[in-house]
Amino acid sequence: MEAGKLSVVATPIGNLGDMTFRGLWTLKEADVIYAEDTRVITKLLSHYGLRTAVLRLDAATEAKKAAEVVARLERGEHVALVSDAGTPAISDPGARLVAHVRRALPEAKIEALPGPSAIPAALSIAGIPADSFLFLGFLPHKKGRQSALTRIAAMLEQDSPCGEVPVVLYESPHRILKLLQELENVAPEARVTLARELTKMHEEVLAGTPAELAASLKKGGKARGEFVVILEPSGI
Ligand code: SAM
């Protein structure tokens, strides 16, 4: 029997209208969709009137579920993988599953269904040259956080051995003020851009020093929503 196909499908980061035609068609045609949170994908599927079966595959179960996915692919099934928002494997589950399938069943087709992701969305409206940039995702929560911040501050300096490129981070609403405070400690003069609530009604881009941004978020009660944080090199 011919091996099946694993489709890695990007989904909207807020606005359900951002689903691509090809991604939708794939979610419709798949035998099963593995999703980080079944409630999130069910909302998307019902928005588009789709009824494909959904199973859970999150960071905690990814390794365990990989064998199950391989068994399906061996039976010739078409499996789709989605995360809660944006592109799977970008600060989301997906990479371990794909690596496992590649190893265990090299004859299976693995295809990319590109679409939304918060990184290009933020950079596209930040007004910061992004011919190259360094994406670091979420900083470690505890161990290694301080040294990561110190390294980032050094990278923003004009004579950085890494060259002068913007640094892009992800941050959640409940840690954004903490991150701004930490950035103020290591790089008080840094020019920081926050892109929040991308593709949603309250989409907004704010720029300033870490202290200015913290004051603005506190004042406007705006420390809600998801954030992409872009740090500009000092020589830009
Ligand atoms: N896989 C996703 C992608 O391709 O962008 C990223 C998932 S990661 C778990 C979630 C983080 O992405 C959020 O904490 C935030 O930093 C960023 N993010 C996701 N959606 C966003 C949005 N609508 N506006 C701003 N940032 C967003």
Image (cartoon, rainbow, N blue to C red):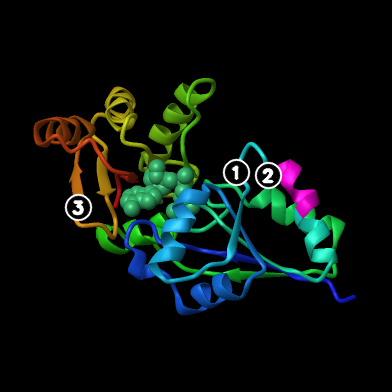
Alpha carbons under labels 2 and 1: distance apart: 6 Å
Q: Amino acid at mark 1?
A: Asp
Q: Magenta span has 175?
A: no
Q: For the N terminus, which image quadrant? A: bottom right
Q: Amino acid at mark 3?
A: Glu
Q: For this rendering, which residue is in front, 143 or 173?
A: 173
Q: Position of residue 212 (x, y in %)?
A: 15, 34
Q: For this rendering, which residue is in front, 118 or 49?
A: 49
Mark 1 lies on residue: 58
Q: Is residue 150 above or below residue 98?
A: above
Closer to us: mark 1 or mark 3?
1
* Mark 3: secondary structure: strand
Q: Which of marks 3 and 1 precedes in the sequence?
A: 1
Q: Is residue 177 above or below residue 231?
A: above
- The part of the chain drawn in magenta is 63-68
* Mark 2: secondary structure: helix
Q: Residue at x 49, y 45 (%)?
A: 162
Mark 3 lies on residue: 204
Q: Which mark is residue 62?
A: 2
Q: Position of residue 187 (x, y in %)?
A: 30, 30
How many neighbours does mark 3 have within 10 angstroms: few (below 14), some (14-19), or many (20 or more)?
Answer: some
